[in-house]
């Protein structure tokens, strides 16, 4: 799945670059959620205490079943990167939004969302 995500982002980046080359007036921002997530996971000084287990779910790493009335729930969701087997926590989503809006080209390119909005 990770390889597919990387290939999709690369193909989309190339497509957008080619379109912008043909239409120089077009402006866009492309966020790399995979890179943002991997960097948080690999950062020993991350803003999260738990990056390998979902806050709500069932099974191994709380990530084999859905978050429902019978699922295990973590004691403090602010310490978790993942809410369930599919979704980030509210804290992770907020961090991602800030990164997309103000972040460097490694996470959002060719310009961030702030630059996109103010570049008219």
Image (cartoon, rainbow, N blue to C red):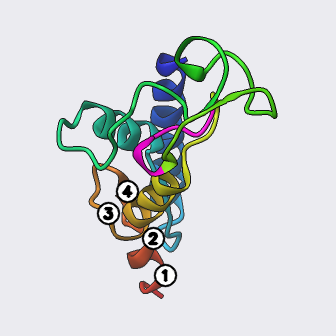
**Circle 4 or circle 2, nearest the eye:** 2
- Residue 83 x %, y %: 58, 40
- Circle 2: element type: helix
- Circle 4: element type: strand
User: Could you tell me what secondary structure mostly forms the magenta stretch?
Assistant: loop
Query: For the residues marked 1 and 4, what is the alpha-carbon distance in whole angstroms?
Result: 13 Å
Query: For the residues marked 4 and 2, what is the alpha-carbon distance in whole angstroms?
Result: 9 Å
- The mark that comes first in sequence, 3 or 1, is 3
Residue 43 location, quadrant = top left
Extreme-right residue of the structure: 69
Q: Name the residue under label 3.
A: 103
Q: In which quarter of the image is the N terminus?
A: top right
Front position in the image: 67 or 27 = 67
Q: Name the residue under label 1.
A: 117
- Total of numbered circles in the picture? 4
Q: Give the range drawn in magenta.
A: 78-84
Position of residue 113 in the picture relative to residue 84 (left or right)? left
Whether the magenta-drawn stretch holds residue 38 is answered as: no
Whether the magenta-drawn stretch holds residue 83 is answered as: yes
Q: Name the residue under label 2.
A: 113
Residue at 42% x, 84% y is 119
Residue at 42% x, 69% y is 101
- The mark that comes first in sequence, 4 or 3, is 3
Residue 32 location, quadrant = top left
Q: How crowded is mark 2: few (under 14 residues within 10 Å), some or many (20 or more)?
A: many
Query: For the residues marked 3 and 2, what is the alpha-carbon distance in whole angstroms?
Result: 8 Å
Extreme-top residue of the structure: 60
């Amino acid at each position: 799945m990770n390889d597919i995500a990387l290939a999709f982002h690369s193909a989309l980046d190339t497509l957008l670059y080619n379109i912008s080359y043909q239409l120089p007036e077009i402006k866009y921002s492309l966020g790399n959620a995979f890179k943002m997530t991997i960097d948080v996971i690999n950062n020993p000084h991350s803003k999260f205490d738990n990056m390998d287990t979902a806050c709500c779910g069932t099974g191994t790493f709380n990530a084999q079943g859905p978050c429902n009335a019978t699922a295990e729930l973590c004691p403090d969701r602010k310490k978790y990167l993942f809410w369930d087997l599919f979704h980030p926590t509210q804290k992770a989503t907020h961090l991602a939004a800030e990164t997309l809006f103000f972040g460097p080209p490694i996470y959002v390119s060719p310009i961030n969302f702030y630059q996109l909005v103010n570049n008219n």
